[in-house]
Amino acid sequence: AAQITNAWVFSGGSASGVMKKVGEALAPHKDVPCFGMPAFGAVLGYDHILSKVKPLTEVMQGQGRADVEKEVEYVHSDESNTFNGAALEPHHTHFVLVDSGKRESKAWGTEI
């Protein structure tokens, strides 16, 4: 149905539960955009991503321009999904990382 209607699919983007099933189901359909919108602080390996972009606080203080559409390679963690975080589901085509400033278990649900 998503292919026929040119739909975009959105999920929480983590490699667990229904979000993992959505990514796996859409894996053979590369022409269907599948967006993950996870809570950034609950993504395993968020510290690696954070090390690759300029903090917004620096940008706001005039210390350079924002990395608005920066592509950062996600390094999948060897850690298993836990209450503190989950890996990104690899079959999603795009991610919008929602950062509330909270980390690990305190970050869950802040993307809503």
Image (spheres, helix red, strand yellow):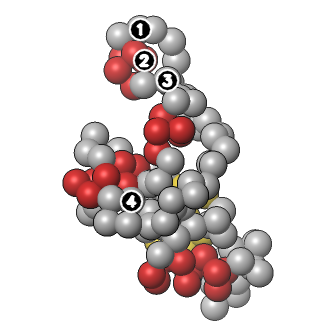
Of the two numbered discs 4 and 3 in the rendering, the one whose residue sits closer to the viewer: 4
Answer with the quarter of the image where residue 56 lies.
top left
Of the two numbered discs 2 and 4 in the rendering, the one whose residue sits closer to the viewer: 4
Amino acid bearing label 4: Gly
What label does residue 54 carry, if any? Answer: 3
Amino acid bearing label 1: Gly
Residue nearest the viewer, comparing 85 with 78: 78
Relative to residue 80, is residue 108 drawn left or right? left
- Residue found at the far left of this picture: 106
Among numbered discs 2 and 3, the one appearing first in the sequence: 3
- Distance in Å between CA atoms under marks 1 and 3: 12 Å
Above or below, 43 against 60 in this view is: below
The residue lying at 63 percent from left, 91 percent from top is 1
Answer with the quarter of the image where residue 112 lies.
bottom left
Of the two numbered discs 1 and 3 in the rendering, the one whose residue sits closer to the viewer: 3
Disc 4 marks which residue? 85
Amino acid bearing label 3: Lys
Disc 1 marks which residue? 62
Cβ atoms under marks 1 and 2 closer than 8 Å: yes
Residue nearest the viewer, comparing 101 with 37: 101
Residue 101 visible, this orientation: yes
- Distance in Å between CA atoms under marks 2 and 4: 28 Å
| Secondary structure found at label 4 | loop
Within 10 Å of disc 4 (Cα), the crowding (few <14, some 14-19, many 20+) is: many
Cβ atoms under marks 2 and 3 closer than 8 Å: yes
Disc 2 marks which residue? 59
- Distance in Å between CA atoms under marks 1 and 2: 5 Å
